[in-house]
Image (cartoon, rainbow, N blue to C red):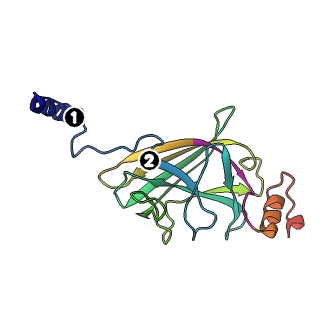
């Protein structure tokens, strides 16, 4: 009887597309951990639902947030990351970006992968400051939808959603002062330096 049950379960799995050749999906939120980078030569730090998304002065100018994901279940070697930010009240899309890049094993979480920091391709860059009325992301809670997908034949995918607030949360006192100046709604470049 046990053998017949095992055969029935195996046949049901194959009929439902869960056989060995079916793409494996990462469950929503369980194996996709959203994270941010203080700098692009440090490890991914976890984002917390309802928490801050620190912005940092970038080489290209302005203050940006750098984010991606740590994922279990993608084995393709390369990952596409899509980040979408939405207004909490209206649901309006504020900003969206897509990046693709190589993966590396996570040093912080065995069994997970994350963007390869030598190549930095799978890291989304969110422009936050100077304040832009057309892209008002700084200092307000936003709903972040972070979707990941392996780019190879397996095509495993997953997503997670959380609320984050881009702000000047990290850095030296001097870096924080420049960040707060550049991110002010009445930004004046002459006052910041």
Q: Which residue lies at the image location 53% right of the left edge and 56% below the top edge?
A: 68
Quarter of the rendering containing residue 46: bottom right
Seen in the picture, residue 123 relative to 30 is either above or below; the reply is below
Q: Residues within 10 Å of mark 1 (few under 14, many from 20)?
A: few
Q: Nearer the viewer, residue 61 or 37?
A: 37
- Badge 2 is on which residue? 31
Query: Secondary structure of the magenta portion, mostly?
Result: strand
Queried whether the magenta region covers residue 51, the answer comes back as no
Give coordinates of residue 159: x percent, y percent: 47, 44
Give coordinates of residue 151: x percent, y percent: 37, 55
Q: Which residue lies at the image location 47% right of the left edge and 48% below the top edge?
A: 32
Q: Earlier in the sequence, mark 2 or mark 1?
A: 1
SS at circle 1: helix
**Looking at the rendered structure, which numbered label has been put on residue 111?**
none
Quarter of the rendering containing residue 174: bottom right
| Residue 26 falls left or right of residue 131 | left
Give the spatial CA distance, label 2 vs label 1: 22 Å
Q: Please state, as top left, top right, bottom left or bottom right, where the C terminus lies in the image.
A: bottom right
Q: Please state, as top left, top right, bottom left or bottom right, where the N terminus lies in the image.
A: top left
Q: Where are the magenta residues, as a range? A: 162-171
């Amino acid at each position: 009887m046990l053998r017949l049950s095992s055969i029935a379960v195996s046949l049901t799995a194959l009929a439902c597309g869960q056989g060995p050749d079916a793409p494996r999906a990462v469950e929503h939120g369980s194996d996709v951990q959203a994270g941010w980078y203080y700098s692009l030569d440090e490890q991914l730090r976890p984002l917390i639902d309802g928490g801050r998304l620190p912005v940092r002065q970038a080489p290209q100018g302005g203050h940006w947030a750098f984010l991606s994901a740590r994922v279990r279940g993608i084995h393709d070697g390369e990952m596409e990351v899509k980040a979408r930010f939405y207004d909490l009240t209206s649901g309006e899309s504020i900003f969206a970006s897509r990046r693709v890049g190589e993966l590396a094993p996570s040093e912080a979480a065995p069994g997970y992968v994350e963007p390869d920091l030598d190549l930095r391709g799978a890291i989304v860059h969110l422009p936050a400051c100077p304040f832009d009325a057309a892209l008002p992301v700084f200092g307000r809670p936003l709903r972040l939808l972070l979707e990941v997908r392996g780019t190879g034949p397996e095509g495993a995918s997953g997503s997670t959603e959380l609320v984050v607030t881009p702000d000047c949360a990290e850095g030296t006192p001097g870096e924080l002062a420049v960040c707060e100046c550049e991110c002010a709604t009445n930004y004046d470049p002459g006052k910041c330096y």
